[in-house]
Structures are given as C-alpha cells and as structure tokens.
Image: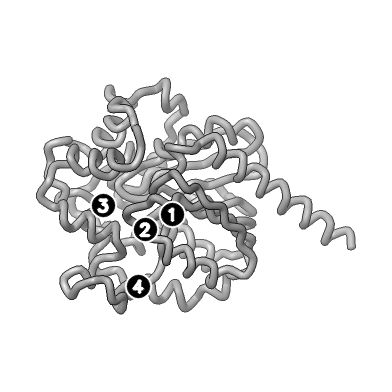
Amino acid sequence: MKPDWLDTKEYPFESKFLELEAGKMHYIDEGEGHPIVFIHGTPSWSFVYRNLIKKLSKTHRCVALDLIGFGLSDKPKDWSYKPRAHAANFEQLMEHLQLKEFTLVVHDFGAPIGLAYAIKYPENVTNIVMLNTWTWSLSNHQVFSKASKYLVGPLGKFLHSKLNVTTNTLVHELFGNESKMPEKIQEQYTKALGDPDEPVKSLACARELVGVSKWYDELWKERKKIQDIPTLILWGERDKLVKIEALQRWKQFFHECYVLHFEDSGHFLMEENAEEVANYVHNFIREEEKKKEKAEHH
C-alpha cells in the first residue's frame, strides 16, 4: 500500500517489503546488472537516491532500503534504533536477496551501517561509494562540549538542538539552507517521518544517535578488513553538518580512494547533483571492472 502523500512521478518504483522482527522493511529493487546497494542517512529515506536510481538502473541492479523507522518502513515505538540494530536488519536484507559482489553506496549515518556489513563480509562488497559521511567516535573531539559528547558528530549535535522543534521545521532547516529544494520535494521528506507536527525527539533519527560512540570505535579498529576495497568519495564542500576534516580522516582509512569535490554543493549531493553523481558512480564501477579483468588475465 502506497501512502497517499507519495509522489509516484518522482518515485516511480515498485515497493517491496521484508518482514523483520522489528516490523516491515521497505525496499526497492530495480534494473539488472552489477548490483548497487544504497543506504540512506538520517532523517532521509531511499527517496534521496531516486534520481541516481532512475539513471543507474538502466545498466545496473539498484537496491535501496528504508531503515526501520524511516520512509515507507514500519516505525515501531519500542524498538532500539541503535546503529547495531539497523546493521543487523541490513544484513538480513542482503541475505534475503542473496546479494554478492555489489557496490555499496552510503551517505551520512548510512556509512556505519554499510561499513559494519562490509567488515563482516568483505568478500561481498566489490566497491564503496561514500557521500558526506563519518564513522568514528567523536567522544575525544575537542570541538564538542561535554553535553554533546554522547552525540555522534555534527548531525547529532544539530538534531539534539532541534529535539523540540517539529518534523516540518527540521526538514526545512536541513534542506532549506543548502539547496533550492522545491517545497514539493521537501514534503516527501517531512511526510516520510510521520506526523509533520510531531516533535523531533519522538523520531527514530533523534533516538538512535545517542550513545553509539563505542560502536563507532569498534568499527574504526576493524577497518583493516576493508581498507583495500576500491572507494570513491564524493564530497559536497558546503556541508554545514559534516566538515571537511571528516574527509581527511577517510583518506587515511582507505588505501585506494578517489575523491571528487563539489564546491557549490552541501550535504545532499544526490539532490543537487544527481546527474553528475550517477555518472561518476557508473564510470567508477566500469573502471574497477576493467582493472579486475586485466589483473585476471595476467
């Protein structure tokens, strides 16, 4: 059942659901070819990737999920919403679809969820594409005050300062500052979070960001398992939430990473530069495939 607020012209995909312990998880599975799996951040949903998927599904199989609590997935009131729980759900979806050798695309909070999977099953992840994200504990980060020590990163801090505003205001502030996003599109984000007048503190995205730094540290320690996976990093430099230092950290994380800067874009590159991002992802996958073939022939 599609909700009546959903703009099916913008999001023309067939909805699929996987029954999990936490509830029904919504995902889409479009096109054929080398699989690309998209994990969204907070407080967005698979809608954020719609323009990439329209383009890339012509040559690739594109799978994008809505984490529980987001988008068209169930929003159980009493579920944990910790990244570890999201990661377990993501793993179940990959198992259900029997996906092997795919390219993983992560944005924002989607990174720890996707990278946790890659660390556990490095043989399944062929390439990684990252858009403005972070994955380490910021508990010893001098910029953060004691109060925000328990919040992950600037996005956590931002959300925390907005806990009493309505969902509607949150989406406006997140997207409004950055891009000339039409009201109609913003509405798809607001409505997907539930009641637009609901205070942010009742949302999954606010609850899950608290107290996860230990988990981030564990991921950081395990990074050797995925350091050699070819990685493309696309970075919007006008991001008010995730600062450029995060990018420097990523460069130390991977052995082979290509970085492309978008000077005039912010946190939501795939809204602002969908066409270019899709082309970069497509070419990156193709180049890596060629390299592999070459290596196999030698």
Q: Residue 184 carries which label?
A: none
Classify mark 1: helix, strand or loop. loop
Nearest-to-viewer mark from 2 and 3: 2
Residue sitting at x 61%, y 58%: 258
Q: Which of marks 2 and 3 is nearer the N terminus?
A: 3
Dot 4, how many residues are within 10 Å of its Cα: few (below 14), some (14-19), or many (20+)? many
- Front one among 153 and 126: 153
- Image coordinates of residue 128 in percent, x first then y, are 57, 56
Where 77 falls versus 208 (above or below)? above
Classify mark 2: helix, strand or loop. loop
- Image coordinates of residue 238 in percent, x first then y, are 39, 50
Where 122 falls versus 11 (above or below)? below
Q: Which amino acid does label 3 sit on?
A: Cys
Residue at image mark 4: 137
Q: Earlier in the sequence, mark 1 or mark 4?
A: 1
Q: Which of marks 2 and 1 is nearer the N terminus?
A: 1
Direction from residue 279 to residue 244 in the image, left or right: left
Q: Which mark is residue 205?
A: 3
Residue at image mark 2: 242
Q: Which of marks 3 and 1 is nearer the N terminus?
A: 1
Q: What residue type is labelled 2?
A: Val
Residue sitting at x 64%, y 60%: 230
Q: Earlier in the sequence, mark 2 or mark 4?
A: 4
- Identify the colour scheme used: one colour
Q: Which mark is residue 132?
A: 1
Q: Quadrant of the N terminus?
A: top left
